[in-house]
Image (tube, rainbow, N blue to C red):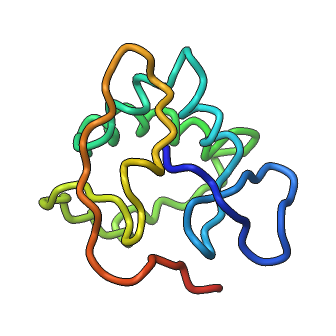
Amino acid sequence: QLRGTGFPGTGSHQGEVASPLKGMMRLQTDHLLARDSATNCEWQSFINDQEKLQESSGFAMSVLAVMGQDTTNFVDCTEAVPVPLPFTGTVKLPASKTMNDIEQACATGAFPKLATTPGPQTAIAPV
């Protein structure tokens, strides 16, 4: 829930909102989920809980991924996709961002205190 400050590329486009990092695109749907009173506390609860995030979003992603598709025509290539390594560190804010850059949306739970990653301002290289 970092405050958005700019857009990648040529500026704002439909379905996109300002993102906190240079070169990063933020989907409007993610922005709204993180800030809507019906979902913001759950969204915030995923911070420092990768397992909960994966369990909660897995079903939704599997449904959305095939919406409108004839799945009988799919080829199973799951063995070609590597299992991601578990996250073992601690969640940190991107370099140059602080807790002052957080847009607190959940009214019933404090936002976790996060350290800032050391180094120069984080940017995402253009593709």
> Residue 54 is drawn in which quadrant?
top left
User: Whole-percent x and y of residue 47?
Assistant: 30, 41
What residue appears at the point 64 percent right and 85 percent down from the top-left corner?
Answer: 126
Is residue 12 left or right of 102 when viewed as pictured?
A: right
Q: Is residue 51 above or below residue 87?
A: above
**Could you tell me which residue is drawn at 60 percent across and 56 percent down?**
74
Q: Quadrant of residue 95?
A: bottom left
Q: Does 71 sit above or below residue 19?
A: above
Can you tell which quarter of the image residue 37 is in?
top right
Q: Quadrant of the C terminus?
A: bottom right
Instruction: Give the tally of numbered discs.
Output: 0
Camera-side residue of 2 and 16: 2
What residue is drawn where x is 83% and y is 68%? Answer: 11
In the image, 60 versus 33, the foreground residue is 33
Q: Position of residue 66 (x, y in %)?
A: 63, 44
Report the residue at 54% width, 79% height from top.
Answer: 124
Q: Which residue lies most toward the front here?
A: 100
Q: Nearer the viewer, residue 1 or 60?
A: 1
Above or below: residue 34 compared with residue 73: above
- Rendering coords of residue 101 (x, y %): 47, 51
Using the image, determine if residue 37 lies above or below residue 67: above
